Amino acid sequence: MASRYPGIKLRLTVAYAGTLRPWLVSGQVDVALLYAAEKHPDLVLEPLIEEELWGLGPKGCGMAGATAVRMADMAGRALVLPSNPHGIRLLVEHACALENLQLNICVETDALPVQRSVVIDGLGYTILPRLRWSATWQPAGWRARR
């Protein structure tokens, strides 16, 4: 890439949407991939994919045989979610608002490894798109359902 585009420096950063969005607006980054991107007058948004949300719980939580988990079933569980205004949190809140559901958030964390540990340790459940959990969570300690 350096030979094709001399003078361009590429920096890849991983962060939640709530962190990336202000960076985009301020010009700290030029491009970002966001969940639930909200319209902003200074940003150009282009949808890339639509992805289902998955409920994740500790091994033995009873979700292993389910073909799907309703949002009403997840909203009442002790949930481990990122804080506002992170994209996944906004997606979950929006889905609950559509069904007039109250979330039961037991832990807020903006670190995916902490989210993973809390769920695997049996202290709560979480809701994530498959891309966020499939490559980083070992199957021995959790169960996932759409």
Image (cartoon, grey):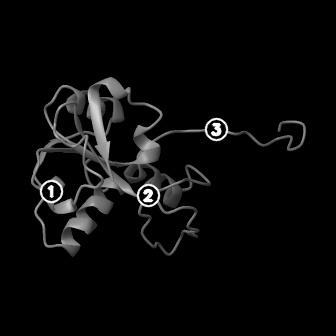
SS for dot 3? loop
Q: Are marks 3 and 1 in contact (CB under 8 Å)?
A: no
Q: Is residue 78 left or right of residue 57?
A: left
CA neighbours of label 3 inside 10 A, class few (<14), some (14 to 19), many (20+): few
Tag 1's secondary structure?
A: helix
- Give amino acid for label 3: Arg
Q: CA distance from mark 3 to mark 2?
A: 20 Å
Check disc 2: other Cα within 10 Å, few if <14, some if 14-19, many if 20+: many
Reply above or below: 31 against 135.
Answer: below
Q: Which residue is mark 3?
A: 11
Image position, residue 145 (x, y; %): 31, 48
Residue position marked by numbered label 2 in the rendering: 35
- Above or below, 122 against 47 in this view is above
Q: Which residue is mark 1?
A: 73
Q: Residue at x 27, y 32 (%)?
A: 142
Reply above or below: 101 against 5: below
Q: Quadrant of the N terminus?
A: top right
Image marks 3 and 2: residues in contact by CB distance under 8 Å: no
